[in-house]
Amino acid sequence: MKFTIGFEKEDAKKLHEYWDDIIENQQWSEGKFTGKFEEKWSEYNKLHSVAFTTWSGAALAVLEFFNVKEKTVLCPSNTFMATPLSVIKAGGNVEFVDCNKEDLCTSFEDLKTKIDKYNPAAVWVVHIGGHIAFQIEEIAALCKEKGIILLEDCAHSHGASWNGKKAGMWGDAGLYSFYATKTISTGEGGMLVTDNKDLVEFAKEYRNYGKFDYKVEGLNYRMSEFTAAIGCVQADRQDYIIDWKNEYAKNHLDLQYPNRVILPEGMVSGYYKYIVFEQIEKSTGKVYDQSCHKIMNRNCKLPNTDWIAQNHWCVPLYYKGDEG
């Protein structure tokens, strides 16, 4: 893979100061930088935050907290396999939902049909490519009306918002990834965001083997202090990176690619991907060229998902900061 990690050279000095502090104090895990990273993410997203080694660890904590074992969870097929696999590993049953052609995200119309058919305990919405799912308001209202847990996969949506509301604020929980390719990266890592204080306490125990009373059957999903220190630096840089990407998209790409994902009024994308509906010569490929229902050999009809897999491409858009 060839990609550019959004990291400013000038931030290296601050990062090395943080790492020197960690080495000097000899607390390489469960220290102040994990807490500091969580505080910065909470300040940005206006929700409680719990850091994990991976998105998957955070997802398992959430799914086990809401006890989806032997229950149905609806999931868009146009997503990475991590989303349905998290349900399977938590003991739940996955059924797939179609997406919209306009935003590549969960179709509200198909979701209504699948809710009536499967009576799910929970629903996944995945914010594809860096923007908010266009029908998130309708989806959130429907889930609330029917008492269904709404989970937001925010792995792509660092810095995304709609009229000031950040990804993760519509659901019962949101889950971010900090994998190496992401707009905000720590190499590996994840973050759970929620306004549910009981979930926060459960998640903190879950990531740490259930210590100290072991009532929570968790494992080790603790983020190291070195990783958290990178997160602190990146969190401080987040607004700058998102502004840079949006300015670049507006000034260099939008006029060149009119057949693209068109954002609704008031929406800001984190531009993890710049998605167009035409084949281009220097594409970085597709967000996903294989849908989850195809990978898992599920016999279900998801026409928009099948169309998207064949008819979208991604224009290179990597943050370069002051190097231009």
Image (cartoon, grey):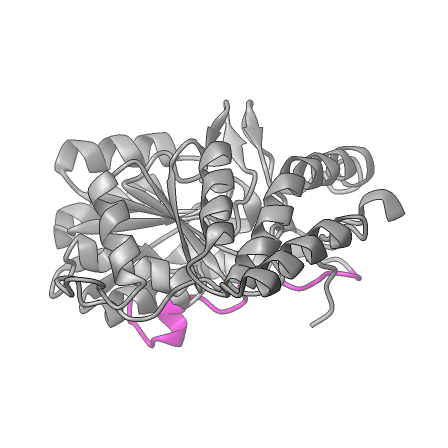
Closer to the camera in the image, 136 or 281: 136
At x 69%, y 72%, the residue is 1
> Is 263 within the magenta?
no
Closer to the camera in the image, 72 or 300: 72
Q: Is residue 23 above or below residue 163?
A: below
> Is 292 within the magenta?
yes
Q: In the image, residue 85 lies at what x, y percent?
A: 33, 69
Question: Relative to residue 167, is residue 72 drawn left or right?
Answer: left
Q: Main secondary structure of the magenta part?
A: loop
Q: Is residue 84 above or below residue 117?
A: below
Closer to the camera in the image, 182 or 214: 214
At x 63%, y 48%, the residue is 234
Q: Is residue 43 above or below residue 22?
A: above
Q: Is residue 264 above or below residue 231?
A: above
Quadrant in which residue 292 is drawn? bottom left
First to last magenta residue range: 281-300
* Any part of residue 324 in sight: no
Q: In the image, residue 313 lies at what x, y percent?
A: 65, 57
Residue sitting farthest toward the right: 323
Quadrant in which residue 213 is drawn? bottom left
